[in-house]
Amino acid sequence: MDDAALRTTFLVARATESRGCLEPGDWPDVAVSLLLEGNDDPEIAELAGLSRRAGGWDTNALLAAAYDRHRISVPDQETAVDLVARLMADDLRARPAAVTGPMIRLLARLAPPDFESNLASRCFAEEEYLDCGCGEDALGFEAELQSMPTLGLPGSVVQALARPLRSTLPAVQPPHGH
């Protein structure tokens, strides 16, 4: 994994953390995927050795050191939602979901309570109509979302970063109706 891909990974991680989609206990899986891609940062190696029960006390100092070394700051809300959207588009291209409008469903969760992102706000408004047949434009919007530019990250890293948000999708198609 080259430096540009590592920086992108850290930027996406910061974005997902800022939107509440990546918890300290998710970092061991992310770190293992980075190690498997050839990353040898000492903080990544230490994060990979943590348990899924790791908390902020275990991860914060390690992440702060890695973010500082690679000059990664917390992105603004609009940028964070865009990065999470591109991450999810990459994940869904590799592993399609079993429900209609998975991007809309996932990004709608990023809108409340402050609605600081236009993209998340639009998804929040569209989500209401996904399961009633009233949302014909939602399917076009969904296709637009799924065709967002790729982040260019390895599949294992995308999957590890996307897993926490993707786990919020329904396992089966919800029934149609209001």
Image (spheres, grey):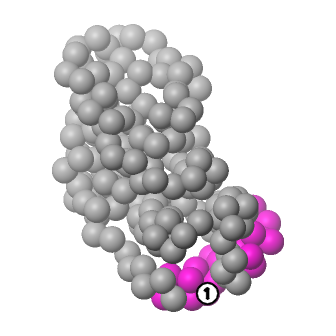
Q: Residue at x 42, y 41 (%)?
A: 89
Label 1 sits on residue: 61
Looking at the image, which is closer to me, 87 or 131? Answer: 87
- Image quarter of residue 50: bottom right
At 48% from the left edge and 34% from the top edge, which residue is drawn?
93
* Picture quarter with the N terminus: bottom right
Q: Amino acid at mark 1?
A: Ala
Q: Position of residue 176 (x, y in %)?
A: 39, 11
Q: Tell me which corner region of the image, top left, top right, bottom left or bottom right, holds residue 135.
A: top left
Q: State whether residue 131 appears in this view.
A: yes
Main SS, magenta residues? helix
Q: How many marks?
A: 1
Furthest residue in direction front, as rendered = 2
Residue 90 to residue 2: above or below: above
Q: Residue 151, percent across and down? A: 42, 54
Q: Quadrant of residue 140?
A: top left
Local secondary structure at mark 1: helix
Identify the residue at image location x=46%, y=53%.
Answer: 152
| The C terminus: image quadrant | top left
Q: Is residue 164 visible?
A: no
Question: Residue 155, percent across and down?
Answer: 59, 47
In magenta segment, residue 59:
yes
* Mark 1 Cα shell of 10 Å, populated few (<14), some (14-19), many (≥20): few
Residue 113 colored magenta?
Answer: no
Is residue 169 depicted above or below 49 in this figure? Answer: above
Magenta residues span 45-68
> Is residue 159 toward the left or the right of residue 143 in the image?
right
In the rendered image, residue 29, in percent from the top left (x then y), is placed at 70, 59
Kindly identify the residue that appears in the image at 46 percent across and 70 percent down. 4
